Amino acid sequence: MENDSIKLNLVLDPDPILHQNSSEWDFNSHVNPDFISNEMTRILEENNAAGIAANQVGISKRIIAIKL
């Protein structure tokens, strides 16, 4: 997931991922955490939001981004 051409998108209700329990982040995962962080921050800013959870971008993991 390090490809610059990949973009995450905001997931809207009634998508089932929004109603599922999220699992813990696996720090041994092959997924680049910087990619997820950057994409979540981009979506947060584009939507003028105060915070966003990973399931709102289609990732069922316990990750959040907040605007301070």
Image (cartoon, helix red, strand yellow):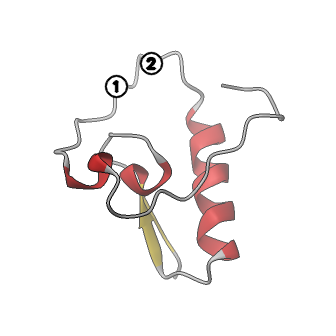
Q: Residue at x 42, y 51 (%)?
A: 54
Q: Residue furthest front?
A: 14
Neighbours of disc 2 within 10 Å: few (<14), some (14-19), many (20+): few
Q: Residue furthest left?
A: 21
- Placement of 12 over or under 24, stated as above or below: below
Q: Residue at x 44, y 66 (%)?
A: 52
Judge from the rendering whether residue 31 lies leftward or rightward of residue 56; answer left or right.
right
Q: Are marks 1 and 2 in contact (CB under 8 Å)?
A: yes
Quick one: quadrant of the N terminus?
top right
Amino acid marked by disc 1: Asp
Q: Residue furthest right?
A: 5
Instruction: Give the structural element (helix, strand or loop) at label 2.
Output: loop
Q: On the image, numbered disc 1 is attached to which residue?
A: 26
Q: Position of residue 4 (x, y in %)?
A: 83, 35
- Placement of 48 over or under 32, stated as above or below: below
Neighbours of disc 1 within 10 Å: few (<14), some (14-19), many (20+): few
Judge from the rendering whether residue 5 lies leftward or rightward of residue 56; answer left or right.
right
Q: Which mark is residue 12?
A: none
Q: Position of residue 62 (x, y in %)?
A: 30, 46
Find the distance from the CA under tag 1 to the CA under tag 2. Answer: 5 Å
Q: On the image, numbered disc 2 is attached to which residue?
A: 29
Name the one closer to the observer, 7 or 13.
13
Q: Residue at x 39, y 25 (%)?
A: 27
Amino acid marked by disc 2: Ser
